[in-house]
Amino acid sequence: MCNPTKKTLKTPKYLVFLFVTGIVIITFTFTYTNLDVPSLLFSKRVEKVPEQQKNSDTSVPFDASREATSQQDNAESDIELENQYLKALIEQEKQDERAFELENEKLLEQLQETKKEVNRLRDNRARRRPMMHDAGNPKESKLEFELLTKLKVDDSDEHQFNPMYHQEWNSHKKQVMEFIYEDSLNDTLLPERSEYFTNIFQLILANKPNIRPLSHYMNGRISNAVYANRQTTPCLTVDELSSHLILEDSDVQALQDTHHRFVRTLSSIYPNDIYEPGTRGIVYVGGKESSWSIMLSIMNIRDSGCNLPVEVLIPSYHEYSLDMCKNVYPRYNARCLFLPGLISGKVRHRNKIHRHQYKSVALALSSFEEVLLLDADNYLLDNPEKLFYSKPFQENGMVTWPDLWKRTTHPRFYTIIGKEITTDTERRVYGYTEYGQRFTQVCEKEEDVPLHQLEGTMADPSSDSSQLLISKREHIGTIILSMYYNTYGPEYYYPILSQGASGQGDKETFIAAAHALDKKYYTVKKMPEFVGSLVQEKWRANAMAQFDATEDYEIAERYRDSTEEVAEQPAVLLLHVKSRELHPWRKYHDERVPHKGDTGRSRLYGDEFPNVAKYDFELETWRNMEKLLCEDKIRFHVFEREEVSTEEACREVLEQIAYLEMTTM
């Protein structure tokens, strides 16, 4: 007997898909209404079975016309049923969409109310105590914390720093985390800034170059002895700079693609509300080990008459000193920024933020719109506030200082950033003359031209990132792109920018980022100089001096067209000191620091340096040590780690001060 429900016509595939989907949805829906779904789905098909066939076991002869009619009826019935399912599905989707819209509208209203409440609390706090958090109102603090956590994009670790949610923490860690939270309330734009840069890190992660690390060299890494004042050796032409790091065409293309995509995306998401307009300050990257050097540097700044606020980025909990951040730094208008509290844990883990990124991250996450970034062991000899008002900064928004070395950037970096440079490009400078247009031959063959003395290339010599003056208003893109270069620096961009030359690391990423984005910057023309002293008839370099950018700019303008050697030079502004030299215990008890003279003591920078600095920098620095160790009796990790007591360090300081006072001019 022929089965009348058998189909010979094919149903379109998309209808079959909708049919199956409809069954699943309707089954799920009716499960909760106790309806007989199978009977509902198949009732019409049951009606198509002839009544006599249901009640008879007798075979029916095959009838072709009846079979065709039955098949057509079944096909039409299937299509009609599928259309009903489709309509039901569409109606259900409309209902779901409307429900979602209502829920979303409700959430948006809650978010707006939350933001209003946060702003109200911030305004109230600002009116009461503009520079300090009101710790006397714990209910309001708790409410603000709860409100702020609702605004986080990544809420997977929203309670990671709230002691209320961490009973496993010991009392010390609870104190640290409580202070970190309380201190963060002073920065009203911190939530917006953290959210923005959390998204930036995700964007960086999405644009990782998909190539092998660049670690192969044809003729080895470029020699470290590439001093800019050694004019002719070597001559860093396009050919010379192309003969070291191996960069295949496929490598260049991959780097170019990801770089272009990142920059293109970046250009559409610059922030406008994450820094307080017109704010200026000084920023360090710190930690327990560097807190000694940073304190001496900050005290040196205060001695110069500068009252600009200071922020110190602390990379991790293990580097965080509660005593320094809560009790010591605030005495000098300085505060700590706790990196794990600024960027969500997931993002930090995925991006593997490492020490090479700390400077660019410190710039990005600090609260100031204009920043002087300093290394921990960098000391100012004059008030730095004038730098923010200087012409080179006002006209360019970024000031860099040169390093001792010639620039060794690979020529194909310019291809990667979309700026082709050829030997036919016009020459920008002639030699390493600091001021004027005096020609100096820099290659054995006069026709050879160093790559980085051509138009369109970065400044030559290379950069010293121990100090950087930058406006985020003008150069936020530069900072973000430098974060990208530093994230992928060890594998890709450090070899490309330096090719193994001395100091390879983050130092070239700021100027490279500005150059890639066609942003203006000023590079100090005066080369750095070593500062040291004679000890037992041997001259030793103990620091590197950098010069005043304001005076440098004025001299450069004054002698712009001069073809004669220029004798005038700017004043020394910064002294980058070897950290061991200002460590009172290491200086006289470590054989690796042989600076004892016949009397057992000596000056680090020579007898004439007070005339250069216009005051006795060395004596004043040791007097600051006396205040920290002998008067305030602050315990520093750098001494505790070496099992040197504060009292022992104090005695060494007092003995050195006595010697310096006898030899001061």
Image (cartoon, grey):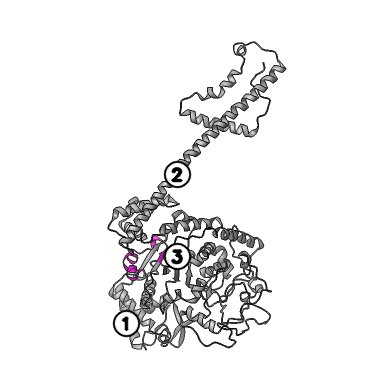
Query: In the figure, 493 relative to 77: above or below?
Result: below
Residue at left 56%, top 21%?
43
Residue 655 numbered mark, or none: 1
Q: Quadrant of the C terminus?
A: bottom left
Residue 168 visible within the image: no
Tell me the amino acid under the disc marked 2. Glu
Residue 188 x, y percent position in the rendering: 38, 59
Query: In the figure, 665 relative to 458: above or below?
Result: below
N-term mark: 3 or 1: 3
N-term mark: 3 or 2: 2
Proximity of marks 2 and 1: CB atoms separated by less than 8 Å: no
Q: Nearer the viewer, residue 58 or 218?
A: 58
Residue at left 67%, top 23%?
72
Q: Nearer the viewer, residue 418 or 461?
A: 418
Q: Nearer the viewer, residue 233 or 176?
A: 176
**Which span of residues is magenta-colored?**
312-333
Tell me the element at label 3.
helix
Residue picked out by circle 2: 105
Residue picked out by circle 3: 362
Q: Is residue 448 magenta?
A: no
Residue 598 visible within the image: yes
Q: Separation of disc 2 and disc 1 at Cα?
A: 72 Å
Tell me the element at label 2.
helix
Tell me the element at label 1.
helix
The chief SS type of the magenta part is helix
Query: Outermost residue toward the right?
Result: 64
Residue 427 x, y percent position in the rendering: 64, 77
Q: Is residue 320 magenta?
A: yes
Relative horizontal placement of residue 550, taking residue 305 as reference (left or right):
right
